[in-house]
Amino acid sequence: MSLIEAKGLRKVFRQAVKEPGLRGAVKHLFTQRYVDKHAVDGIDLTIREGETVAYVGPNGAGKSTTIKMLSGVLVPTSGELRVDGFVPHKQRMENAVRIGAVFGQRTQLWWDIPVRESLNLLKDIYQVPEDAFRRNLDAFVELLGMEEFIHLSARKLSLGQRMRADLAAALLHDPKIVYLDEPTIGLDVSVKQKIRSFIKQMNRDKGTTLLLTTHDLGDIEDLCERLVIIDHGRIIYDGSLQAVKDAFARERTIHLQLGSELAEPSLLFSDLPEVGMDRTGPYRLAIRFDRFRITASEIVKRIISQADVADFHIDEPNIESIIRRVYEGSLDLELAAESPVAASREA
Ligand SMILES: Nc1ncnc2c1ncn2[C@@H]1O[C@H](COP(=O)(O)OP(=O)(O)OP(=O)(O)O)[C@@H](O)[C@H]1O
Ligand SMILES: [Mg+2]
């Protein structure tokens, strides 16, 4: 069953245009000029229960605006939107108990009271039963390492501590869906790791549906199976992460540890001039190849015909370089959408 259903969802902001300087400000008082900013420009998005979706795009693409509409904070300009059957901005209470949201840029904790008290207040607001509250709190404190700061007020927390506290606050009432808007922004690697494994565990154990925006592509690789790319308020790709990798990461590298020297290295790939071979150390080779031209197993077979192979591994394609090329407009995403993996998801 689909949990989030958006059709033709739009948000237009009226932005005032001002000329620079004092003269501009004065003139603006009398003759106000506006432009319409189509922040979200007609998106169709269906998310099923338990899915993990990365919602990515360049700065200003419309990601946060989308999430704010899904959370009921912003009223859509037009289009249809239902979250678990409810219209978020109209049925706010029904919506609120179903969702948890973390906006990395700001906190939902009370600034001046200890985190523990904030969580207590949220328990009352969401009417979380006492035993569920205990269970969740104990688990969150342990998984997120909150012991050292749960007695402090939010204003005293470091960024990484605050983010963990915010995550706990958002998930305390066992929401079906979590929206995370840049939850790992500015965090060190170990806190990032804690947050990621926590989210993974929530998805695995409770089937929590996840919609995540991030500029940290490690988050995506670690957490999400589905990738939605938005640009200028429109969805330009929606499919599995694997499909994007398969379609675009044609170039792979295989690293080999040899047990003896190659007999005739120049003959190995004389029929495939695009295959690149680098010596990366004594008895070590890195071979770059286009996987549509030659398979990894064929490469290994050829090497074995000339030398002993002690060990080898293949680099996973890197989503970072792929997404950069998408943003720069140098990749045709239709290709990935047409791949068999994407097609099977649609089915
Ligand atoms: N309240 C607002 N009033 C006017 N314009 C807005 C408002 N909120 C957002 N916008 C505009 O809408 C566009 C989309 O903004 P949004 O915050 O959704 O982008 P984003 O994809 O989250 O970007 P980022 O990666 O930088 O967080 C931007 O051009 C922004 O200036
Ligand atoms: Mg944003």
Image (cartoon, grey):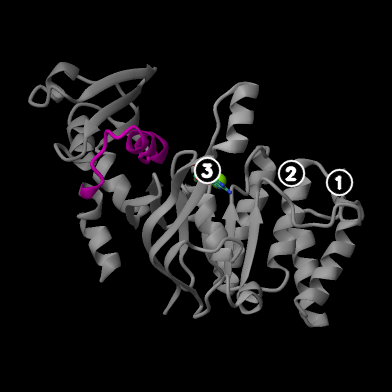
Q: Nearer the viewer, mark 3 or mark 1?
A: 3
* Mark before the other along the chain sequence, 3 or 2: 3
Q: Position of residue 199 (x, y in %)?
A: 61, 59
- Residue at point 26%, 59% (across, down): 341
Amino acid type shown at disc 1: Arg
Magenta highlight on residue 50:
no
Instruction: State the extent of the magenta-drawn residues as a range.
Output: 316-334
Q: Relative to 107, does residue 209 appear above or below in the rendering? A: below
Q: Position of residue 249 (x, y in %)?
A: 29, 39
* Mark before the other along the chain sequence, 3 or 1: 3
Amino acid type shown at disc 2: Gly
Q: Is mark 3 within 8 Å of ligand 1?
A: yes
Q: Nearer the viewer, mark 2 or mark 1?
A: 1
Q: Is residue 47 visible?
A: no
Disc 3 marks which residue? Answer: 15
**SS state under label 2:** helix
Disc 2 marks which residue? Answer: 160
Q: Position of residue 241 (x, y in %)?
A: 37, 52
Q: Is mark 2 within 8 Å of ligand 2?
A: no
Q: Relative to 83, does residue 62 appear above or below in the rendering? A: above
Q: Position of residue 48 (x, y in %)?
A: 43, 72
Disc 1 marks which residue? Answer: 155
Residue 207 vs residue 325: left or right?
right
Residue 183 vs residue 13: left or right?
right
Between the residue at mark 3 and the residue at mark 2, the CA separation in whole angstroms equals 34 Å
Q: Relative to 8, does residue 39 appear above or below in the rendering? A: above
**Decide: marks 3, 2 in contact (CB < 8 A)?**
no
**SS state under label 1:** helix
Q: Residues within 10 Å of mark 3 (few under 14, many from 20)?
A: few
* Mark before the other along the chain sequence, 2 or 1: 1
Amino acid type shown at disc 3: Gln
- Residue at point 58%, 75% (across, down): 90
